Structures are given as structure tokens and as C-alpha cells.
Image (cartoon, rainbow, N blue to C red):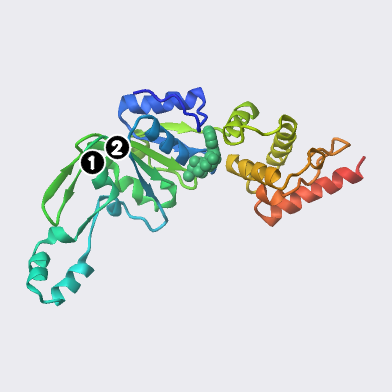
């Protein structure tokens, strides 16, 4: 099984190498990178390319590792026990009826090999990755309520993404293959844009890309716009039929681009950008 990118997803050679290394080692692939650099989409694309169903687990600050294994629904059991019908009574007696399977359980017991995405692991608290070490390593876990051992029938292909908001524990890192998605250079970005907007006029694209990288390289930005922001912005430029001239300033100085709200998402960054434009106009 080899991953070679897809029609919708541009994978650089080092990214393809990382995916295939994780496949060979049978270890989770830990993908880091700025938001919007295609981490989540990578898991979707690899799963599609390899013909595997993808199970997704989106992590929040309140997510606990146990939820990925199973949860015991005591509330439903109590409620059922208060309804006194004969059928309910039989149901209530068997605790297995109140064990809710988590996404790891589903991945472990699936008929065919599956891909499993643990998305934005850095959102959870610091214990979360450590709490999953054994499950990810041994591909098994124990259900105390029913005294059952759940073992993976097939080793799932695991993707773990992180936006780098928190450091991950060393013991966890040791078990993963790591890849950092660098922000795409102009040439790669051009290919990504082509995938999304095949018919875009060359000149408009060139001018938009120039503006985009100017904005991105502005020193002191709190939040740099990334791939998904560029794609949104291009979509708007096309939808609003913005003329090429609006993107090109005559004197080769930076100007505030139209629909800049697609690129800069907070007032400090906007102010910073406007100040720069103002200073340039007045310091000739
Ligand atoms: N390499 C790429 N090829 C094609 N589209 C991409 C690529 N990288 C990012 N994108 C676009 O950017 C969007 C955001 O990607 P996403 O996977 O959600 O980023 P992340 O999970 O890193 O925040 C995707 O929906 C896709 O449209
Ligand atoms: Mg994502």
C-alpha cells in the first residue's frame, strides 16, 4: 500500500514519504502544522486512496481518553429500571446493553482495516495522550464492567493531528512517526489552488498570490492567513468579479486588498496592515 497524493490533494514528496513510513512501521502518523495546512484533509485523502473507511474523533478541551474506548450509560440504566415492564427488566439486568462503544472500539472491531483520525489532540488536557498510550501500542483495552478484552482484529491506520497549542508527552511521541507540514511555498500553493480553481485567470492568480504572501510575511501578525484563507479569498474575488487592477497598486507599494476580511481575522492585524500602507504612502 503506497500513498501518492490524489486529484484533490497535493502532497509534497516529504509528506508522501511520511505517510508511507507510518504505514511501514505500523505506527500512528502525527501530523503538525499551522491550522489550514491540510492535516485533517490528509487523513481523509489517504483513507480514500487506500480504500479504507475513515473513523473520525474530533477532540475538544473536555474530551477524555475513556470516551474513545467506551462509556457506561448509568443514567439510561437507572431510567429503564424504573419502568417496570418485563422486557425492560431483562434488558436492565445485562450491563452490556448500557456500554456505549467509542470510536477506538469501533475501529478495533471493524470487519475490514480502517483508518482512524484523532483530530486536534492538542485541544485535550495534558493527560489525554498518555491515557491512550497502551491502547495505541498494544491495540487492545479491557472493559471492566463486562470483564472483556477488546483486541484489534486489524491494526487501524492512525492519524493524529496537532495545531501545536500544547507540547505532547515524550512517551507518546516515541510511539508515533512525526511529520510537520511546512507552510506551502508559492509553487506548491499554486498547485493547491489549481486543484480548487482550475479555470482561474493566470494574471489574477499571480496578483492574488503576490498580495497573499505580502500579507503573510508582514512581521508581527498575530494570525497569519493560511491555505484555507487563501482559498476563501480567491473564491470571493471570483464571485465578486474583482478586476485585476484592484489587486495591483500602480506604484508597486502595498495596498489594502479588497475583501481583506477573508485573510486577516482580527483588528490588531488589520490595524498593523493599514499602518504599514499609510507609512509607505507618506514616506516616499
Ligand atoms: N495540500 C492540499 N491540497 C489541496 N487542498 C488543500 C491542501 N491543504 C489545504 N487544502 C485546503 O485547505 C482546507 C483546510 O484544510 P484542513 O485539512 O481542514 O486543514 P487543517 O486540518 O490543517 O487545519 C481544505 O479543506 C482544503 O480545501
Ligand atoms: Mg483540521
Identify the element where label 2 is drawn: loop
Residue 97 shown left or right of residue 250 in the figure: left
Q: Quadrant of the N terminus?
A: top left
Q: Is residue 109 visible?
A: yes
Mark 2 C-beta closer than 8 Å to ligand 2: no
CA distance for labels 1 and 2 = 7 Å
Q: Quadrant of the C terminus?
A: top right
Residue 63 position in % (x across, y down):
36, 55
Mark 1 C-beta closer than 8 Å to ligand 2: no
What is the crowding at mark 1: few (fewer than 14 residues within 10 Å), some, or many (at least 20)?
some
The one of 198 and 184 positioned closer to us in this rendering? 198
Residue 79 position in % (x across, y down):
19, 73
18, above or below 137, in the image: above
Residue that numbered label 1 is attached to: 110
Residue that numbered label 2 is attached to: 114
Residue 241 shown left or right of residue 167 in the figure: right
* Quarter residue 37 falls in: top right
140, above or below 25, in the image: below
Q: Is residue 37 visible?
A: no
Residue 30's disc is: none
Residue 214 position in % (x across, y down):
73, 38
Residue 275 shown left or right of residue 132 in the figure: right
What is the crowding at mark 2: few (fewer than 14 residues within 10 Å), some, or many (at least 20)?
many
Q: Are marks 1 and 2 in contact (CB under 8 Å)?
A: yes
Q: Residue at x 82, y 39 (%)?
A: 245
Residue 127 shown left or right of residue 85 in the figure: right
Amino acid at each position: 500500500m503506497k500513498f501518492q497524493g490524489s486529484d484533490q490533494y497535493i502532497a509534497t514528496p516529504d509528506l508522501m514519504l511520511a505517510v508511507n513510513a507510518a504505514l511501514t512501521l505500523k505506527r500512528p502518523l502525527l501530523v503538525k502544522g499551522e491550522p489550514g495546512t491540510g492535516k485533517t484533509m490528509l487523513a481523509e485523502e489517504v483513507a480514500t486512496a487506500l480504500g479504507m473507511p475513515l473513523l473520525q474523533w474530533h477532540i475538544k478541551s473536555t474530551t477524555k481518553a475513556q470516551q474513545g474506548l467506551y462509556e457506561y450509560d448509568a443514567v439510561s440504566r437507572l431510567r429503564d429500571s424504573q419502568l417496570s415492564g418485563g422486557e425492560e427488566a431483562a434488558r436492565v439486568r445485562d450491563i452490556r446493553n448500557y456500554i456505549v462503544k467509542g470510536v477506538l472500539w469501533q475501529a478495533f472491531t471493524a470487519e475490514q482495516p480502517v483508518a482512524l483520525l484523532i483530530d486536534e489532540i492538542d485541544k485535550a488536557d495534558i493527560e489525554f495522550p498518555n491515557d491512550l498510550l497502551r491502547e495505541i501500542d498494544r491495540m487492545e483495552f479491557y472493559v471492566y464492567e463486562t470483564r472483556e478484552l477488546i483486541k484489534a482484529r486489524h491494526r487501524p491506520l492512525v492519524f493524529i493531528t496537532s495545531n501545536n497549542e500544547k507540547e505532547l508527552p515524550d512517551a507518546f511521541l516515541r510511539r508515533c512517526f512525526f511529520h510537520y507540514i511546512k507552510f506551502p511555498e508559492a509553487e506548491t500553493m499554486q498547485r493547491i489552488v489549481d486543484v480548487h480553481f482550475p479555470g482561474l485567470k493566470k494574471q489574477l492568480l499571480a496578483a492574488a498570490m503576490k498580495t497573499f504572501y505580502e500579507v503573510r510575511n508582514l512581521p508581527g501578525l498575530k494570525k497569519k492567513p493560511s491555505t484555507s484563507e487563501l482559498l476563501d479569498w480567491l473564491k470571493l474575488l471570483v464571485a465578486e468579479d474583482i478586476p485585476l487592477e484592484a489587486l495591483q497598486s500602480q506604484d508597486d507599494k502595498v495596498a489594502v486588498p479588497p475583501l481583506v476580511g477573508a485573510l486577516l481575522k482580527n483588528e490588531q492585524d488589520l490595524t498593523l496592515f493599514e499602518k504599514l500602507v499609510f507609512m509607505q504612502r507618506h514616506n516616499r
